[in-house]
């Protein structure tokens, strides 16, 4: 037994509709001694991700459901505090799918080393250089195929994936319209990220505003949310438009049947292409994306932003806040 107390975030019950704090519990255990080849990682930052909602519900997805009364698992950056493995040394920084906890015991196939750069902050490795950056990069460039002068509409535009999608589309010379959930986020997108336009979908005149902004139609619709926002965007598709289906967060807390995309007739009339995105399909090319994303950041053309909440105890709240739209940029928890 190592002389360390470990707090873990457990899933107590499966959320019904909106997740609640009562679905989670912080439990305290001690850290057992390391066996051969095992590595002890102290968590520094937890990534808080919408896809975890499906795993909490027990729905089949790209990963198996979370078990009840067990520690949640997500992307974590940490530092090695003890190691019985010759490939990993004490003090090294690593990233992996680890426990939502102060400490995780892992084997070397569960973690990868992070080479720190002076000008790249640690949280960036879970944001622009993590899954959101990879999702945005391959989603907009490979599935969206943007051309200069085209109109790109992206939803959840101030979030981790959406904010990077819009910035890459700007780099490629597109007109970018962001759809988001507050006036503060509208200002962030237009003033800080230089999107051409941004709209608050919670405003009563949203449908009219969208029609006005899309006076030349939509060439690429990058969808993170689904539901009624997507229904409205479908009305403005151009001939040969591309729809990137990245996420459907507006339906993740829905208990009813999945209503899905309804505008098949429009898709035929517009000769449109709909492509589903699974970021891990591109894992062999993550290094290529990393190099390009770092270059854009260094050139000042791509901004990284994280919404950092302090303390492991606040991880359940940070997760719930995703569905309240509290985050601008990548939602993270810093472990004190
Ligand atoms: N396909 C893939 O491989 C892949 C990989 C990563 C992520 N994703 C998906 O990409 C999407 C974005 O993920 P992210 O990590 O970047 O999260 P995020 O956008 O940083 O955070 C979630 C945001 O969703 C918005 N939202 C919440 N409930 C909503 C609703 N009912 N209607 C409309 N918007 C709502 C909120 O912003 P507002 O203030 O704008 O409402 C909230 O801030 C998610 O759907 C996720 O599942 C897919």
Image: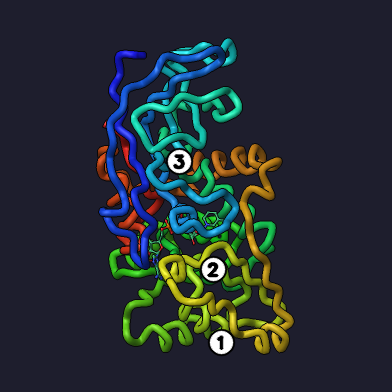
Q: Secondary structure at mark 2?
A: strand
Q: Position of residue 303 (x, y in %)?
A: 44, 48
User: For mark 2, what is the residue?
Assistant: 223
Answer with mark 1 or mark 2, whichever residue precedes in sequence: 2
Q: In this image, 42 relative to 131: left or right?
A: left
Q: Nearer the viewer, residue 79 or 185?
A: 79
Disc 2 residue crowd, few under 14, some 14–19, many 20+, Cα 10 Å: many
Image quadrant in which the C terminus is located: top left
Q: In this image, 156 relative to 320: left or right?
A: right
Q: CA distance from mark 1 to mark 2?
A: 14 Å
Quarter of the render that holds ligand 1: bottom left
Q: Is residue 105 above or below residue 204?
A: above
Q: Residue at x 54, y 25 (%)?
A: 113
Q: Nearer the viewer, residue 175 or 125?
A: 125
User: For mark 3, what is the residue?
Assistant: 73
User: For mark 1, what is the residue?
Assistant: 235
Q: Secondary structure at mark 3?
A: strand
Q: CA distance from mark 1 to mark 3?
A: 39 Å
Instruction: Tell which tag, 3 or 2, sits nearer the viewer.
Output: 3
Q: Nearer the viewer, residue 310 or 173?
A: 310
Q: Is residue 146 visible?
A: no
Whether the residues at callouts 1 and 2 have beta carbons within 8 Å, the answer is no
Answer with mark 1 or mark 3, whichever residue precedes in sequence: 3
Q: Secondary structure at mark 1?
A: loop
Q: Nearer the viewer, residue 152 or 181?
A: 181
């Amino acid at each position: 037994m190592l002389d360390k107390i470990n707090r873990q975030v457990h899933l107590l019950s499966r959320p019904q509709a909106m997740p609640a704090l009562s679905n989670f519990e912080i439990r305290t255990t001690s850290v057992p001694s390391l066996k051969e080849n095992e590595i002890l990682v102290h968590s520094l930052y937890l990534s808080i991700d919408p896809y975890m909602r499906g795993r909490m519900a027990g729905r089949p997805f790209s990963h198996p459901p979370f078990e009840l009364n067990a520690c949640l698992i997500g992307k974590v950056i940490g530092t090695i505090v003890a190691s019985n493995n010759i490939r990993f040394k004490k003090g090294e920084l690593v990233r992996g799918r680890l426990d939502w906890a102060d400490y995780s015991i892992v084997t070397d196939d569960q973690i990868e080393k992070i080479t720190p750069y002076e000008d790249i902050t640690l949280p960036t490795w879970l944001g622009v250089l993590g899954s959101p950056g990879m999702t945005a990069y391959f989603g907009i460039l490979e599935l969206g195929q943007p051309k200069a002068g085209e109109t790109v509409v992206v939803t959840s535009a101030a979030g981790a994936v959406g904010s990077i999608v819009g910035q890459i589309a700007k780099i490629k010379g597109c007109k970018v319209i962001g759809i988001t959930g507050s006036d503060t986020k509208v200002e962030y997108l237009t003033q800080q990220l230089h999107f051409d336009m941004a709209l608050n979908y919670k405003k009563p005149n949203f449908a009219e505003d969208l029609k006005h902004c899309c006076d030349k139609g939509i060439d690429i619709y990058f969808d993170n949310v689904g539901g009624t926002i997507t229904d409205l965007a479908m009305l403005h598709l151009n001939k040969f438009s591309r729809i990137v289906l990245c996420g459907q967060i507006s339906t993740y807390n829905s208990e009813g049947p999945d209503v899905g995309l309804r505008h098949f007739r429009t898709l035929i009339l517009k000769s449109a292409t709909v492509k589903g995105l699974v970021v891990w399909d591109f894992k062999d090319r993550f290094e290529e994306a990393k190099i390009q994303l770092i270059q854009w950041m260094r050139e000042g053309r791509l901004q990284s932003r994280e919404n950092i909440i302090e303390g492991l105890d606040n991880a359940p709240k940070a997760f719930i806040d995703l569905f309240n739209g509290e985050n601008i940029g990548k939602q993270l928890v810093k472990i004190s």
